[in-house]
Image (cartoon, rainbow, N blue to C red):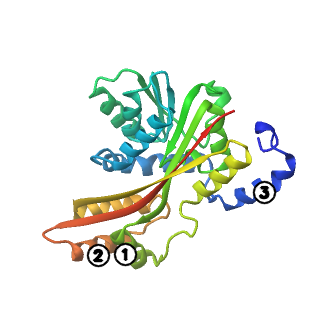
């Protein structure tokens, strides 16, 4: 695609390859990785579904409406849709919404959430975007809006290109560029010896923005500041942190025990208050 999309000059290939080198690389490939990812996200499905009012959803949906990227004739593809909270919001306005996710448990919650509101203009299917074949799915330019919100939709240039190919009009990707969670950061340092944030923020966003610009899609970027506070039991918090850390590293039994030990010491009356302050970036573009 680097030499063909939107007439991009072959001389820019070296620049595109530079950003390819910055995209985080996955060590594990193939069926084993796919099955592990399914299990890891299945483990987080209940946690994600239980999230209450989300300021991010309100702001992102408002942005799509303001830019007329989401309207009553929209056909939307939401990649990494999770428990369908965004898909549900989109379905209140759009003509039709398709949500895809690697996790069967996430999708079960998604179907329940839209059914609870009587929405009938949605469909959900289990799909790993890493291995999805747009031609085989017959999704080339099928959708008016393709979104990847806090999802693996843009975890590589190839995945981003599939997003572009599936849309005949608009695309949007969103993720954190800055996120401060004192409790989580304390656990990372104590249990894994990790200290300090990624200097690029969410690196996939940085690479995607530059790649979209090189493809002459002239992306726009909008930032939102979000604050969130939740109260959980030690058991809930411990399991949530273990599931979250498991997405990027393998935890030993001793490390899991250490997480609970630290949380128990910090708890008051068996409860923990977790505060997160973040900056979210949304990148929007219009296909030619």
> Residue at position x 37%, y 50% from top?
43
Residue 23 lies, with reference to residue 183, above or below; the image says above
Residue 62 left/right relative to 47 = right
**C-alpha separation, residue under disc 1 versus residue under disc 2:** 9 Å
Identify the mark nearer the N-term, 1 or 2: 1
Badge 2 is on which residue?
A: 262
Residue 224 lies, with reference to residue 139, above or below; the image says below
- Picture disc at residue 186: 1
- Of residues 205 and 221, the one nearer the viewer is 221
> Residue at position x 27%, y 60% from top?
229
| Mark 2 closeness class: few <14, some 14–19, many ≥20 residues within 10 Å | some
Residue 114 left/right relative to 146 = left
Q: Are marks 1 and 2 in contact (CB under 8 Å)?
A: yes
Of labels 1 and 3, the one closer to you? 3
Q: Position of residue 247 (x, y in %)?
A: 47, 58
Of labels 3 and 2, the one closer to you? 3
> Residue at position x 16%, y 67% from top?
270
- Of residues 175 and 98, the one nearer the viewer is 175
Label 2: which secondary element: helix
> Residue at position x 54%, y 45% from top?
173
| Mark 3 closeness class: few <14, some 14–19, many ≥20 residues within 10 Å | some
Residue 261 left/right relative to 78 = left
Q: Position of residue 176 (x, y in %)?
A: 47, 57
Which quadrant would residue 233 be assigned to in this image?
Answer: bottom left
Q: Residue furthest left?
A: 269
Of labels 1 and 2, the one closer to you? 1
- Picture disc at residue 215: none
**C-alpha separation, residue under disc 3 versus residue under disc 2:** 45 Å
């Amino acid at each position: 695609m680097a030499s063909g999309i939107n007439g991009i000059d072959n001389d820019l290939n070296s620049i595109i390859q530079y950003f390819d080198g910055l995209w985080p690389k996955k060590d594990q490939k193939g069926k084993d990785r796919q099955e592990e990812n399914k299990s890891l996200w299945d483990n987080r499905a209940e946690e994600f579904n239980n999230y209450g009012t989300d300021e991010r959803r309100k702001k992102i949906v408002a942005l799509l409406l303001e830019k007329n990227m989401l309207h009553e004739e929209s056909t939307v593809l939401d990649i990494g849709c999770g428990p369908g909270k965004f898909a549900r919001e989109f379905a209140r306005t759009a003509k039709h919404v398709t949500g895809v996710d690697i996790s069967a448990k996430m999708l079960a919650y998604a179907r329940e959430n839209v059914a609870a509101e009587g929405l009938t203009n949605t469909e959900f299917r289990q799909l790993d975007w890493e291995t999805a074949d747009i031609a085989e799915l017959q999704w080339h330019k099928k959708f008016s809006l393709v979104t990847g919100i806090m999802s693996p939709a843009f975890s590589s240039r190839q995945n981003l290109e599939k997003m572009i190919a599936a849309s005949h009009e608009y695309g949007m990707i969103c993720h954190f560029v800055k996120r401060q969670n004192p409790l989580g950061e304390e656990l990372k340092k104590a249990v894994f010896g990790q200290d300090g944030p990624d200097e690029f923020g969410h690196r996939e966003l940085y690479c995607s923005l530059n790649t979209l610009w090189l493809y002459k899609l002239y992306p726009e970027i909008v930032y939102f500041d979000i604050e969130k506070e939740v109260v959980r039991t030690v058991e809930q918090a411990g399991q949530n942190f273990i599931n979250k850390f498991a997405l990027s590293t393998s935890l030993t039994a001793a490390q899991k025990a250490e997480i609970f030990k630290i949380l128990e010491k910090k708890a008051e009356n068996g409860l923990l208050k977790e505060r997160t302050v973040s900056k979210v970036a949304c990148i929007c573009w219009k296909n030619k």
